[in-house]
Amino acid sequence: MSRLTERFIEKAILAGAEVEPTSGLNDAARHVKDFLKKNNIRSAIISPELKRRDPFKQEFSELETGLTTGSLWVEAGLVAADYGIAETGSVVHFDRTDEEKNLWTLPDICICLLERTKIVPGLESISAEISGHLSQTKIPSPQVSLITGPSRTSDIESHLTIGVHGPARLVILLLDEI
């Protein structure tokens, strides 16, 4: 395991994320199925990009790729990150629509797949990619999501609340390849 990967894992865990190494998509799909079953998760959504990939296409064919009026609240969102930031343990996704951003931020649990080769030292390492994405005019709503562990917020009396502005639980499946 590279030093960059080790640092990413260390920082992600310090931020409250759960990190599970996997060997590839088949292993990741098994982890997701086991996780959903073990945690008794009955409602989940999956990103369109991830749902198009085997084995997720077969294993999770029943999952919606976005929120519907009948399912405005779901327990888990399954997504694939574009990058990981070793300096902070953050995952980065280049959202193309508001709906994609909802997959990351609305469910209580975000299950995120991240390819080890997409871990970079710091945010400045991908500044050109971020600028390029945000300047796109052919997609409806270019945004960049950065998630560092579970969402935390505190009120004026310093009472900590988890999961208000993002997932209450972040599970990162670290893959050799996607």
Image (cartoon, rainbow, N blue to C red):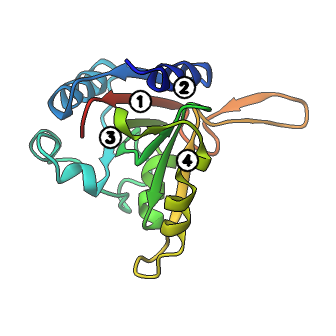
Q: Quadrant of residue 109?
A: top left
Residue 81, quarter of picture: top left
Residue furthest toward the left? 58
Amino acid under disc 2: Ala
Give the Cα separation between the discs numbered 4 and 3.
36 Å
Contact between marks 3 and 2 (CB within 8 A): the answer is no
Label of residue 43 in the image = 3
Q: CA distance from mark 4 to mark 1?
A: 21 Å
- Mark 2: few, some, or many residues within 10 Å (few <14, many ≥20)? many
Q: What element does badge 2 sit on?
A: helix
Q: Are marks 4 and 1 in contact (CB under 8 Å)?
A: no
Q: Secondary structure at mark 3?
A: loop
- Residue, x 46% and y 82% (percent of image)? 137
Judged left or right of residue 64, residue 171 is right
Q: Looking at the image, is mark 1 or mark 3 nearer the viewer?
A: 1
In terms of secondary structure, where does tag 4 sit?
A: helix
Which kind of residue does numbered mark 1 sit on?
Ile
Q: Quadrant of the C terminus?
A: top left
If you read the primary sequence from the N terminus, does the residue marked by circle 3 or circle 2 appear first?
Answer: 2
Which of the marked residues, 4 or 3, is nearer the chain's N terminus?
3
Mark 3 and mark 1 in contact (Cβ < 8 Å)? no
Question: Residue 125's mark?
Answer: 4
Amino acid type at circle 4 is Ser
In the displayed structure, would residue 42 be above or below residue 52?
above
Q: Secondary structure at mark 1?
A: strand
Q: Residue under circle 1?
A: 172
Q: Nearer the viewer, mark 2 or mark 4?
A: 4
Q: Residues within 10 Å of mark 3 (few under 14, many from 20)?
A: some
